[in-house]
Amino acid sequence: MKWKQFVTPVRNMEADEVRSYMQAHREGTFTLLDVRQPKEYEKARIPGAKLIPLPQLTDRMDELDPQKPLIAY
């Protein structure tokens, strides 16, 4: 996928690690990206998450701040 050229790969994180990261960093200093479909997002989401469904990600990369760490789920 072309979008991969815009992100720096990092290791996978378990849910507990993500929770710890989010608790240790101020909201707004990282991007929490939900790549699921809108119906899934409406049913259940993490507060503060930005929805960009995976099929739209390539076209919407400009909505993400390249200077902030990105957590995608």
Image: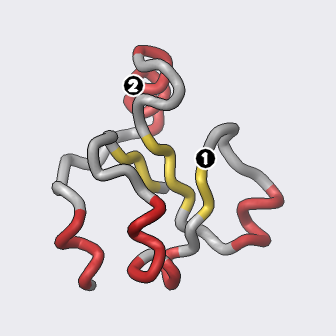
Q: Residue at coordinates 31% horizontally, 41% vertically from top-left?
A: 69
- Relative to 13, 20 lies left or right: right
Gap between marks 2 and 1 measured at Cα:
14 Å
- Relative to 56, 62 lies left or right: left
Tally of numbered tags: 2
Q: Do the residues bearing badges 2 and 1 touch, measured as CB atoms within 8 Å?
A: no
Give the structural element (helix, strand or loop) at label 2.
helix
Q: Position of residue 54 (x, y in %)?
A: 49, 76
Task: Give the amino acid at mark 1.
Answer: Ala
Q: Nearer the viewer, residue 45 or 6?
A: 6
Farthest-out residue, front? 62
- Relative to 13, 38 lies left or right: right
Q: Quadrant of residue 13?
A: top left
Question: Relative to residue 55, is residue 57 depicted above or below?
Answer: above
Q: Residue at coordinates 36% horizontally, 47% vertically from top-left?
A: 70
Question: Would you call the spot at circle 1 few (<14 residues within 10 Å), some (14-19), or many (20 or more)?
Answer: some
Q: Which mark is residue 49?
A: 1
Task: Give the amino acid at mark 2.
Answer: Tyr
Q: Residue at coordinates 23% horizontally, 60% vertically from top-left?
A: 7
Image quarter hosting the N terminus: bottom left
Give the structural element (helix, strand or loop) at label 1.
loop
Which residue is labeled 2 in the image? Answer: 21
